[in-house]
Image (spheres, rainbow, N blue to C red):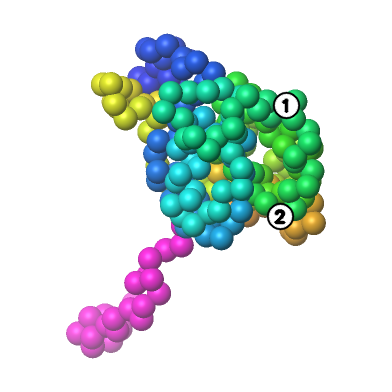
């Protein structure tokens, strides 16, 4: 059994500055779109990084309203407004009626990000990509039990964070999920567990057994 250093907190390579791990694995957004359609949905990305998530959501039909990030990176999407500190700017969140805030925040500020967005944007959908194990974290319990949590969509694969520079084989094997919080006005019942719909052929009429296949039905019961 191969040990995974990242799972043990002893990764073999240096931590990225600002925890800037770009969401390069397009399957993450594609899976979200299958269980929670993005087409026609207006969204903002407040921690856009390089812009990977923005581009992928647009590919699924999402409509970008705004994107920003505190930091500026090389080859960053020019639409990203840099220098915007999510935890300082309180002016633009309260009016986001029905708009979706969707992001993959730095791990170091994950819980603060969730708490801030739920407090500052009561009328918006909040969609966060993070480790599935957050379901078991005590500090997240108040955000996951009751309240605005609308659904959880576990990814049926482990995302890739390194695609080049010889690191593709060193991707940590963490399970991830999309967490979806609804606006205050949309709270309706307990959270849903969202899975990809099964293929249509599963609902086709199964072939009927031939008489030869039912020969055992004529046997006397002992």
Horizontal placement of 27 versus 110: left or right? left
Q: Secondary structure at mark 2?
A: loop
Residue 113 percent location from the top left of the image: 68, 30
* CA distance for labels 1 and 2: 21 Å
Q: Is residue 14 above or below residue 39?
A: above
Q: Is residue 199 above or below residue 84?
A: below
Horizontal placement of 141 versus 194: left or right? right
Q: Residue at x 33, y 78 (%)?
A: 206
Quarter the N terminus occupies: top left
Q: Are marks 1 and 2 in contact (CB under 8 Å)?
A: no
Among numbered discs 1 and 2, the one appearing first in the sequence:
1
Asked whether residue 29 is drawn in magenta, I would say: no
Quarter the C terminus occupies: bottom left
Q: Is residue 143 above or below residue 204?
A: above
Q: Nearer the viewer, residue 221 or 189?
A: 189
Residue 170 percent location from the top left of the image: 33, 23
Residue 199 percent location from the top left of the image: 38, 66
Q: Secondary structure at mark 1?
A: loop
Q: Magenta residues?
A: 194-222
- Residue assigned mark 2: 98
Q: Which residue occupies the extreme front position in the image?
A: 78
């Amino acid at each position: 059994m191969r040990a995974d250093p990242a799972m043990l907190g002893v990764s073999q390579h240096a931590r990225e500055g600002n925890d800037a791990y770009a969401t390069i694995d397009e399957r993450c957004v594609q899976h979200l779109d299958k269980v929670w359609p993005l087409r026609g949905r207006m969204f903002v990305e407040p921690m856009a990084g390089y812009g990977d998530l923005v581009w992928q959501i647009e590919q699924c039909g999402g409509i970008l309203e705004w994107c920003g990030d505190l930091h500026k990176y090389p080859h960053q999407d020019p639409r990203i407004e840099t220098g915007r500190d999510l935890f300082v700017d309180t002016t633009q969140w309260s009016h986001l009626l029905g708009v979706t805030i969707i992001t993959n925040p730095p791990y170091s500020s994950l819980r603060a990000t969730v708490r801030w967005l739920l407090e500052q944007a009561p009328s918006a959908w909040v969609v966060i990509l993070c480790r599935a194990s957050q379901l078991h974290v005590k500090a997240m319990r108040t955000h996951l039990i009751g309240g605005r949590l609308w659904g959880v969509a576990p990814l049926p694969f482990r995302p890739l964070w390194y695609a080049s520079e010889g690191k593709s084989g060193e991707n940590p094997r963490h399970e991830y999920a999309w967490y979806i919080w609804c606006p205050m006005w949309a709270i309706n019942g307990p959270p849903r567990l969202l899975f990809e719909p099964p293929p249509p052929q599963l609902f086709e009429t199964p072939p009927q057994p031939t008489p030869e296949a039912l020969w055992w039905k004529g046997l006397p019961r002992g």
